[in-house]
Image (tube, rainbow, N blue to C red):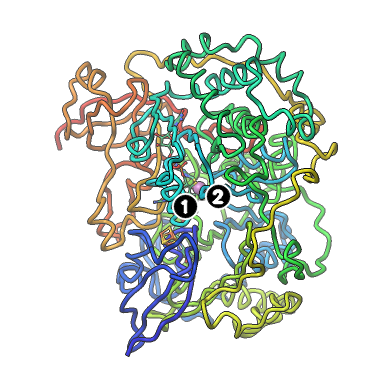
Amino acid sequence: MANRIYSICFMCTVRCPMEVMVANDDVVWVQGNRHVPGLEGALCAKGSAGPALLHDHERPQYPMIRTGERGAGQWRRASWDEALDYVAARLKDIVQEHGGHSVVFGERTNLNTHISKTFMKALGSPNHFTHDALCKGSVNTAFRSLTGYTDAEVGIDYANTRHIVMYGRNIFEALEIAPLNNLLNAMGKGAKLTYIDPRVSVTATKADRYWMIRPGTDLALNYALIHTIIKEQLYDKDYVQRWVEGLSELQAFVEPYTPEWAEKETGIPAGEIKALAREAAEVKPKVIFHYGYRGSHHPNEIYLRRSLVILNALMGSIESPGGLFFKKGAKAAGRGDIGKYVSQEFPKITQPRFDGSGAAAFPVADSGHGNPQQLAQAIMTEDPYPIKALFANRFEPLQSIPDSAAVRRALDKLDLIVAIDVNFSEIAWYADVILPESIYLERADSIQMVSGLKPSLRRRQQAVSPRYDTRPSWQILKGLAERLGLGHYFPYETIEDIWNFQLKDMGVKIEDFEAKGFVSLTDKAIWMDRKGLKFKTPSGKIELVSSLLEKAGLPSFPPYEPVAPPPEGSFHLMVGRCAAHTHVSTQNNAYLSELVPENELWINPAAASRLGIKNGDYVEVFSPLKTHGRIRAKVTEFMHPDGVFMLHGFGKTVPAQTRCYQKGASDALLQENVSDRVGGSPALDSTLVQVRPAELR
Ligand SMILES: Nc1nc2c(c(=O)[nH]1)N[C@H]1C(S)=C(S)[C@@H](COP(=O)(O)OP(=O)(O)OC[C@H]3O[C@@H](n4cnc5c(=O)[nH]c(N)nc54)[C@H](O)[C@@H]3O)O[C@H]1N2
Ligand SMILES: Nc1nc2c(c(=O)[nH]1)N[C@H]1C(S)=C(S)[C@@H](COP(=O)(O)OP(=O)(O)OC[C@H]3O[C@@H](n4cnc5c(=O)[nH]c(N)nc54)[C@H](O)[C@@H]3O)O[C@H]1N2
Ligand code: SF4
Ligand SMILES: [Mo]
């Protein structure tokens, strides 16, 4: 008889609630948690491939200490005590000589982030960073500059929308299951989807309207939409009058940006731009201009993301059913906050962050997350101080930061690199010590507070015992802290201790998760009263002229800078995800590597024919960084002639990952590390590359 365990998937960070059927301490079936509305029992292809990760022999099976050169793949097996003693001894020396701030800890935000942050505060370092700037930093700053809320505090009411406009938000492939199901249901009831992308993605094929925009010109389109909306008075007058400040400044600013002007810049006919503005306004406020998930395509991204939030504000759709909403947490549901170990008292940290976040380099970017793309530069320049040690926990700096060759060179300067990972990632292979984490099916983690219209709590339970000699990160970090004399900041022994601590002010008990795997904190969706909205800006309103930006000496409305077409033979390198893979994590998965074994370079037929490239040929992609990648060409009308496109996450160099070793090309090796200095994210689609037929091998 199989046993049902309610848990949370972690094949990607969407973290869908799941049911795991377990027999004889093995996973026999996984599916989405059928009690969770919107999920409808589904997991995606990646979630369904979780058992292949569980049984994978090609993942780290025990702690390992490097014996050869960095990256040479020579290791010795260590016991946990030996590996933790080894790391702690080196860390002690580094902290004594260079201070706690010389230690940097990078991670993809996860359920135990409050524990990782505790570890860094205990060490006396301000340098905990998350993937946020690489993912959605510019969206974050755009929201803060207009509403005072971060993007993480905003959600989208897909289920009730009448029209959604997406700009390269390829939700049918770069997916989140429940939101996508909600969108599909809304479309089934007649909601419209407009999709804009220089490439015909799967989402484009599902759309009612699709525009193949010229790469990098979405901002011109939006200024023309705003121009039309204001000129034709299509905006929600009540809402704008009550909640929006700065309409006249905006009106003066967009005056020259007519649809006819935008047609020349974007390639989208002026008449169609006007038609979209009118159609969207007809169903306001149940209309959504999707503000984007992945942060930055181009260096001026902040102004694109701001223009998207502004379009929602003009439609009156911020905090409106069928539009956007502010996520409600435990407090809104009349509960106490979830406990976090990071809320303890720590000795004061006086050093600035290593990455310029919140300082001159990135004056308004969210310093709660940091700017990991500065890692290589900060190590090399030792400005503001030398960095000596890096922890990479569930984070892959060698594939997730542009210009990975520069990152690799910089890592050589470090005294200590520790990888906490479940795969032989590039960073694990380059580390001094690998501390292998148990995978999500083998471990329990801190309880998740899920804010939203109906806030709830979710729990990851351990489904099976670890296949190998691995541990959860909350145990690993406590083990290290104890060896550094900092164990008192980690007052737990078991996961139940952590759960009880988290739940102590919430009126919820561990047993309450038994029935369905989650606990709802309210039955009814919580909306703010439309007459009593609360924005966290100084004026309490949506500030089109932003106090945050202006105070930092940054303009709210800089003039539009035209995007020059790429020179003959050059292309914007555009990148993205497919439904079968998670970023850089799953390329070696036994099932998923069969579905999508390598990436291809999408290229327009006219360009391909000028270059003598045929569909299926291997080509070389050359970057201005003097790096290059070998990849198969996919010659297709579905690609704008100014761009080429490849999937992120391929071109791996770790021989231990035999299924994906050297398959396809790595985007991070080709991308220049150029940032949106206002928003905070690196521009992932702006590098100009050249393409040539590959020499036969
Ligand atoms: N299967 C899967 N799903 C995921 C993830 C995953 O790894 N795998 N990751 C999750 C995460 S963390 C994120 S951030 C989201 C990402 O979600 P998305 O941002 O929707 O995903 P991407 O695949 O990066 O898609 C980017 C799209 O932008 C287009 N694009 C490039 N340049 C331009 C331009 O100038 N203008 C316009 N309009 N479009 C352009 C590209 O052609 C591409 O189709 O996906 C989430 N969901
Ligand atoms: N060049 C380039 N860079 C990008 C992007 C891009 O498109 N191109 N996209 C950006 C975006 S949107 C995002 S969100 C980030 C994502 O960047 P990352 O978070 O770095 O990427 P992931 O693939 O999600 O995961 C990274 C690491 O986590 C490990 N891992 C997976 N599960 C576990 C676990 O349970 N425990 C531990 N300890 N480790 C685990 C994986 O093996 C992998 O090494 O990358 C950003 N950077
Ligand atoms: S989207 Fe897929 S991989 Fe990600 S958590 Fe959900 S089921 Fe798992
Ligand atoms: Mo992301």
Decide if residue 443 is on the left or right side of residue 676. Answer: left
The type of residue carrying mark 1 is: Asn
The secondary structure type at the circle numbered 2 is: loop
Q: Residue at x 65, y 44 (%)?
A: 320
Mark 2: few/some/many CA within 10 Å (<14, 14-19, 20+): some
Mark 1: few/some/many CA within 10 Å (<14, 14-19, 20+): some
Q: Are marks 1 and 2 in contact (CB under 8 Å)?
A: no
Q: Earlier in the sequence, mark 1 or mark 2?
A: 1
Depth order, front residue of 352/677: 677
Label 1 vs label 2: CA separation? 48 Å
Depth order, front residue of 519/345: 519
Q: Quadrant of the C terminus?
A: top left
Q: Residue at x 74, y 26 (%)?
A: 554
Decide if residue 487 is on the left or right side of residue 534. Answer: left
| Residue beneath disc 1 | 182
Q: Residue at x 75, y 23 (%)?
A: 247
Task: List x then y, in percent, for residue 531.
Answer: 79, 43
Task: List x then y, in percent, for residue 361.
Answer: 69, 35
Q: Is residue 83 visible?
A: no
Depth order, front residue of 318/222: 318
The type of residue carrying mark 2 is: Lys
The secondary structure type at the circle numbered 1 is: helix
Q: Residue at x 65, y 78 (%)?
A: 483
Q: Quadrant of the N terminus?
A: bottom left
Decide if residue 184 is on the left or right side of residue 458. Answer: left
Residue 2 marker:
none
Examine the rendered structure and indicate whether residue 71 appears above or below residue 445.
above
Examine the rendered structure and indicate whether residue 543 appears above or below residue 564.
below
Examine the rendered structure and indicate whether residue 41 appears above or below residue 263.
below
| Residue beneath disc 2 | 413
